[in-house]
């Protein structure tokens, strides 16, 4: 099976920098079940196409080793696995394009963070549930989807159509997102996996689904199939998705009552957190507020609804997330007066930035745990020394409360992207030191159900000058 990715903006050969693969040099990668060949069938200034071809060894698959269907007998030898786009292709994508998938680019970081005109073509994709599902999965992600179908055998039209399709996806999208969408959705369409699906698959799903899965109208189906319908894994994944993205999802109907219960519990925490932040902002009479690491804009949306907030800014390091915030807040459709109240921009709270200045209060809600601990000092300076608003509100998970999340292994974090989680003592020590270093006072607030022994799920520090 073949995957191609075409980029059509001059100089199109920049695709080579983004994929970390030189357009003039074909390469072969050894995989546990065969080989992956990567080359560029075309590489001109206007148009550059990268191709990934899988060469799976059917005998290797059949030997009861990795990839055996386990059903034994003839089926192990006669099957479509070597010839179709399946979880083997996902494994190859992450192996060959792993760096691009994580959004890193040494030579062209700005291109890696931008939506680009890209087209992907996936050949021989089996779609259980037929063609409609291909549209349902890719269209909500903003792609123009074209599907070619094939007859089972042209000599015997009465046999009908096959379940294999060639799918083209076209859109303005970051390369990183395109790769992650394909990585997750191929095994979902195929509804099969060549390896044992255990709890670590949840991490993969959350990692590769970051920023898009939570709002996908088919997230129930995607999660279900990705985790091979293992009920316990599915409910854990849905729970973590909501908890980790902290996004209010008002469209998606959770499919089972037990899931809904869990989901509501989490939504509740999110609402409580935002409500507490707004209350703290009002208590210090903040009129101009900047929300750093604003995500999809849940807090911004609450601030917009309250007239006492005159000037509101949202900052996030992720371009994609900001785009979604723009959509959710319907910025383009706001009346002029409202539009003037809000400003969204891309930025990082670890780099000094003039645009962070001039606000009464800054909120940093569930963000610091995404920073490497050695970047915290930079963040402290940027906010407390240079931007220096009258009030700073910082919230972060309370690690002690994790014992209440039955699905978390002891010592593990709530989100794959969390670099650390702190106990109350750790947070309070950090906050007290920051307050002392920069001349602020700090008070602490617990958010969510309070457990006598372990405290609450979220902890918040309110710093004031
Ligand atoms: N504050 C939001 C989102 C929390 S998720 C809420 O409570 O709903 C964490 C967010 O921090 C993500 O959107 C992520 O893109 C952003 N982020 C991570 N590192 C950042 C950095 N260095 N600067 C700015 N934002 C960052």
Image (cartoon, grey):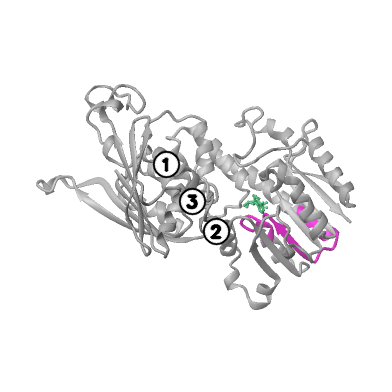
Which segment is the magenta one? 277-300
Task: Kindly report the distance in space between the C-alpha atoms of the residues bearing marks 1 and 3.
Answer: 13 Å
Task: Kindly report the distance in space between the C-alpha atoms of the residues bearing marks 2 and 1.
Answer: 21 Å
Q: Which residue is mark 3?
A: 176
Quadrant (top left/top right/bottom left/bottom right) for the N terminus:
top left
**Residue 13, located in which quarter of the rendered image?**
bottom left
In the image, residue 368 lies at what x, y percent?
71, 46
Q: On the rendered structure, is 157 left or right of 182?
A: left
Labels 1 and 3: the sequence-earlier one: 1
In the image, residue 373 lies at what x, y percent?
71, 41
Q: On the rendered structure, is 231 left or right of 188?
A: right
Q: Out of 426 and 223, give the one closest to the viewer.
A: 426
Quadrant (top left/top right/bottom left/bottom right) for the C terminus:
bottom right
Asked if residue 261 shows in the view, the reply is no
Q: Residue at x 64, y 64 (%)?
A: 345
Per the image, label 1 sits on a secondary structure element best described as helix
Q: Residue at x 62, y 31 (%)?
A: 408
Per the image, label 2 sits on a secondary structure element best described as helix
Per the image, label 3 sits on a secondary structure element best described as helix
Q: Which residue is mark 1?
A: 96
Label 3 lies in ligand 1 vicinity (Cβ under 8 Å) = no
In this rendering, the answer to whether 412 lies above or below 123 is above
Q: Is residue 290 magenta?
A: yes
Q: Out of 219 and 145, give the one closest to the viewer.
A: 145
- Dot 3 crowding, Cα within 10 Å, few <14, some 14–19, many 20+: many
Q: Out of 114 and 279, give the one closest to the viewer.
A: 114
Task: Kindly report the distance in space between the C-alpha atoms of the residues bearing marks 3 and 2.
Answer: 12 Å
Q: Which residue is mark 2?
A: 110
Q: Residue at x 29, y 41 (%)?
A: 84
Which residue extends farthest bottom?
Answer: 336
């Amino acid at each position: 099976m073949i995957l191609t990715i075409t980029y059509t903006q001059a100089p199109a050969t920049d695709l080579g920098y983004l994929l970390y693969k030189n357009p003039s040099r074909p390469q072969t990668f050894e995989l546990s079940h065969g080989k992956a060949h990567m080359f560029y069938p075309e590489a001109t200034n206007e148009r550059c196409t990268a191709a990934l071809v899988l060469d799976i060894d059917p005998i290797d698959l059949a030997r009861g080793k990795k990839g055996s269907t386990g059903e034994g007998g003839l089926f192990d030898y006669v099957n479509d696995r070597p010839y179709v786009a399946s979880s083997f292709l996902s494994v190859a994508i992450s192996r060959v394009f792993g760096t691009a998938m994580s959004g890193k680019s040494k030579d062209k970081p700005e291109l890696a963070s931008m939506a680009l005109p890209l087209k992907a073509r996936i050949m021989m994709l089996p779609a259980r549930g037929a063609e409609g599902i291909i549209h349902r999965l890719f269209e909500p992600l903003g792609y123009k989807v074209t599907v070619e179908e094939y007859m089972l055998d042209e000599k015997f039209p009465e046999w009908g159509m096959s379940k294999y399709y060639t799918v083209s996806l076209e859109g303005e999208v970051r390369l990183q997102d395109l790769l992650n969408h394909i990585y997750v959705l191929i095994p979902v369409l195929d509804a099969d996996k060549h390896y044992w699906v255990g709890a670590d698959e949840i991490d993969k799903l959350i990692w590769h689904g970051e920023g898009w899965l939570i709002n996908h109208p088919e997230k129930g189906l995607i999660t279900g199939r990705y985790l091979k319908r293992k009920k316990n894994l599915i409910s854990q994944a849905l729970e973590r998705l909501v908890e980790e993205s902290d996004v209010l999802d008002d469209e998606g109907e959770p499919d089972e009552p037990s899931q809904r219960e869990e989901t509501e519990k989490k939504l509740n925490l999110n609402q409580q957190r935002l409500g507490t932040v707004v209350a703290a902002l009002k208590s210090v009479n903040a009129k101009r507020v900047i929300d750093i690491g604003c995500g999809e804009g849940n807090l911004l949306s609450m601030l917009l609804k309250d007239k006492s907030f005159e000037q509101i800014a949202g900052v996030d390091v992720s371009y994609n997330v900001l785009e979604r915030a723009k959509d959710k807040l319907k910025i383009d459709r706001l009346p002029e007066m409202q539009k003037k109240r809000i400003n969204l921009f891309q930025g990082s709270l670890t780099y000094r930035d003039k645009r962070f200045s001039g606000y009464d209060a800054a909120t940093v809600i569930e963000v610091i745990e995404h920073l490497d601990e050695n970047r915290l000092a930079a963040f402290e300076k940027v906010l407390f020394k240079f931007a220096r608003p009258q009030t700073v509100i910082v919230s972060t998970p309370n690690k002690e409360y994790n014992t209440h999340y039955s699905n978390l292994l002891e010592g593990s974090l709530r989100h794959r992207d969390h670099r650390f989680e702190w106990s109350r003592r750790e947070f309070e020590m950090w906050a007290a030191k920051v307050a002392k270093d920069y001349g602020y006072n700090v008070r602490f607030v617990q958010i969510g159900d309070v457990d006598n022994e372990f405290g609450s799920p979220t902890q918040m520090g309110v710093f004031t000058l």
